[in-house]
């Protein structure tokens, strides 16, 4: 889905080449593509330190794009769907992936979690991702950000349901339901404000 949206962006970008922000957008987009390709390579060769660093750089570049686009006025649905939406969804997914990548790095270092058990840390990360998602969705009026987290939490719920880590599954389900409700609330509220 992310790559399909990005293909749409690559096609429609020619309609905004005259916009003042296009040069900066293009620069950060090329950087994000380079980081994405680099991450795939280092992850394939299990270079965990490098993968974590590149993931953070990818997250930074997408954050720059996301913030840049928040200051632009998009009037047509085509621009909203093919320029703004791709980077909202992409950033949300990389936020989740960054948490997973850092977790993989800690596991590779044989970190035992300190005062918390592995399950407790997983639950903490799920809750942290949820709080970040809610903040971004409400602050920048992008409910679609929550859809990616809902998808991720559904995957976590499905993986750990009816296992020894049922507590993780339960928290993921609670977060999933909460974000689903907030998505509907935000979507309704923001649409109503844009109409009025």
Image (spheres, rainbow, N blue to C red):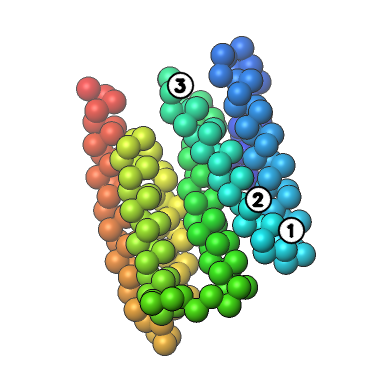
Q: Nearer the viewer, mark 2 or mark 3?
A: 2
2 or 3: tag closer to the N-terminus: 2
Q: CA distance from mark 3 to mark 1?
A: 35 Å
- Residue 42, numbered circle: 1
Looking at the image, the residue that sits furthest to the front is 114
Q: CA distance from mark 2 to mark 3?
A: 28 Å
What residue does disc 2 label?
A: 54
Residue 115: percent from left, percent from top: 38, 77
**Element class at badge 1:** helix
1 or 2: tag closer to the N-terminus: 1
Residue 168: percent from left, percent from top: 38, 75
Q: Nearer the viewer, mark 3 or mark 1?
A: 1
Q: Quadrant of residue 145?
A: top left
Q: Quadrant of residue 120?
A: bottom left
Q: Is residue 81 visible?
A: no
- Residue at 62%, 73% in the rendered image: 108
Q: Is residue 38 left or right of residue 92?
A: right
Is mark 1 in CB contact (under 8 Å) with mark 2? yes
**Element class at badge 2:** helix
């Amino acid at each position: 889905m992310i790559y399909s949206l990005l293909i749409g962006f690559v096609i429609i970008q020619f309609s905004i080449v005259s916009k003042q922000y296009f040069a900066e957008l293009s620069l950060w987009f090329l950087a994000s593509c380079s980081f994405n390709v680099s991450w795939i390579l280092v992850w394939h060769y299990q270079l965990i330190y490098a993968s974590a660093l590149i993931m953070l750089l990818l997250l930074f570049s997408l954050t720059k794009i996301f913030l840049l686009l928040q200051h632009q006025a998009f009037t047509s649905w085509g621009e909203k769907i093919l320029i703004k939406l791709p980077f909202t969804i992409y950033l949300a997914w990389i936020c989740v992936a960054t948490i997973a990548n850092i977790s993989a790095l800690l596991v590779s270092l044989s970190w035992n979690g300190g005062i918390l058990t592995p399950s407790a840390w997983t639950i903490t990360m799920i809750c942290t991702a949820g709080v970040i998602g809610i903040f971004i969705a409400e602050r920048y009026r992008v409910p679609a950000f929550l859809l990616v987290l809902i998808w991720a939490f559904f995957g976590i719920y499905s993986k750990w349901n009816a296992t020894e880590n049922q507590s993780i599954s339960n928290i993921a389900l609670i977060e999933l339901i909460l974000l689903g409700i907030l998505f509907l609330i935000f979507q309704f509220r923001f649409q109503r404000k844009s109409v009025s």
